[in-house]
Amino acid sequence: MDDLETLKHAKKYIDKLANGINPITDQPVPETDTVNNVRITRCLFYVSSALQKMIDHSDTEKETKQRTAKGSKKKAFWLSVDDLNAFAFSDTPIPISEICKRLNDLKRDDGMKKFSRKRVVEWLMLTGLLETDTDEAGVVRKRPTEQGKNIGINSETRVGTRGNYTAVFYNREAQQFILDNFYNILQMDVHAE
């Protein structure tokens, strides 16, 4: 295991701990466990963020070296059924960007394009699981339809530095639905990838 793989592995453990999950057993830790202390949890999320920056920097460096060495043509993204079976499901609802990150972490060939969030979102819209909604300020947002909610896609309004925004999350069933339809999603023709 090289340094980058070790960082990714460590980040997975930190993420699980930050979410109150024992990284060894994948079981929730008791509420009274030290890892569930708010200050410890914040610290773990901070460490996770720092590790992600290191991983992103290493990935970018690695991709630049490969592009320079091979030219810039990358192969289409692809995972085998065995690769998909290794997907790390989250019992806590996660955003589509995290699902795509976890799928990208499964690729074995660094010469492949990344699996894009845009591809999944467009497929979910075409299948009637997501729709767009324009708020009173004229901002277009995506949100789950009733059919989307039935498979485990939910949204909530959050407050960010630029005001309110809608965050869309996918529970374990919705994550499974995306994996079950992975090869259909790959067929999407997304031009801006």
Image (cartoon, rainbow, N blue to C red):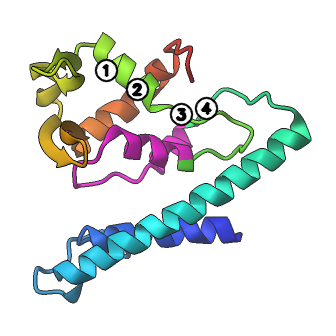
Q: Is residue 143 visible?
A: yes
Q: Earlier in the sequence, mark 3 or mark 1?
A: 3
Labels 1 and 2 touching (C-beta < 8 A): yes
How much space separates mark 2 and mark 4, taking CA atoms?
A: 14 Å
Image: 191 above or below 9: above
How far apart marks 3 and 4 lie (CA) works out to 8 Å
Decide: marks 3, 2 in contact (CB < 8 A)?
Answer: yes
Q: Element under label 3?
A: loop
Give the SS element for disc 4.
loop
Q: Amino acid at mark 2?
A: Val
How far is mark 3 from mark 1, CA to CA? 15 Å
Q: Position of residue 22 (x, y in %)?
A: 30, 75
Name the kind of residue labelled 3 in the image.
Phe
Neighbours of disc 1 within 10 Å: few (<14), some (14-19), many (20+): some
> What residue is disc 3 on?
115
Amino acid carrying mark 1 in the image: Leu
Give the residue number, with chain letter if any, for mark 1. Answer: 124
Amino acid of disc 4: Trp
Instruction: Left or right? Give the position of 103 relative to 157.
Output: right
Say if the magenta span includes residue 29. no
What residue is disc 2 on? 120
Residue ID at (33%, 68%): 16
Label annotation for residue 78: 4
Q: Is residue 99 above or below residue 35?
A: above
Residue in view at x 14 percent, y 80 percent:
30
Span highlighted in magenta in the image: 81-104
Q: Quadrant of the C terminus?
A: top right
